[in-house]
Image (spheres, rainbow, N blue to C red):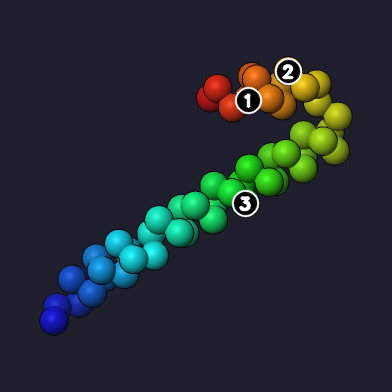
Amino acid sequence: MSTKNGGRSAFREYGPIVLFAAVTIGGMIFIWTAKLAAWSTFVEVTAIPKF
């Protein structure tokens, strides 16, 4: 088995969960920061997620 194929297999196996975890943690950090900064609900819920 080639090293190139082994890397591709690992990416296909772990890529989705790594992406999910990164987006989830990023969202948690965003919500936490928005709450601590006392942003308005409009900014938190409506304006920012549209980007």
Rendered residue at 34%/66% (across/down): 13
Determine whether the residue tagged by mark 1 lies in a helix, strand or loop: helix
Percent coordinates x, y for residue 10 in the rendering: 31, 69
Mark earlier in primary sequence (2, 1): 2
For residue 11, the mark is none
Q: Amino acid at mark 3?
A: Ile
Position above or below: 9 against 23: below
Disc 3 and disc 1 in contact, CB within 8 angstroms = no
Rendered residue at 54%/47% (across/down): 23
Residue found at the far left of this picture = 1
Rendered residue at 47%/59% (across/down): 18
Percent coordinates x, y for residue 47 in the rendering: 64, 19
Q: Amino acid at mark 1?
A: Ile
For residue 48, the mark is 1
Rendered residue at 65%/20% (across/down): 46
In space, the residues marked 2 and 3 are separated at their CA atoms by 22 Å
- Count neighbours of disc 3 (C-alpha within 10 A) and say few if under 14, some if 14 to 19, many if 20 or more: few
Q: Is residue 7 left or right of residue 18?
A: left
In space, the residues marked 3 and 1 are separated at their CA atoms by 16 Å
| Residue bearing the label numbered 2 | 42
Determine whether the residue tagged by mark 3 lies in a helix, strand or loop: helix
- Count neighbours of disc 1 (C-alpha within 10 A) and say few if under 14, some if 14 to 19, many if 20 or more: few
Mark earlier in primary sequence (3, 1): 3
On the image, which quarter does residue 16 sit in? bottom left
On the image, which quarter does residue 17 sit in? bottom left
Position above or below: 36 against 43: below
In space, the residues marked 2 and 1 are separated at their CA atoms by 9 Å
Q: Amino acid at mark 2?
A: Phe
Position above or below: 45 against 3: above
For residue 25, the mark is 3
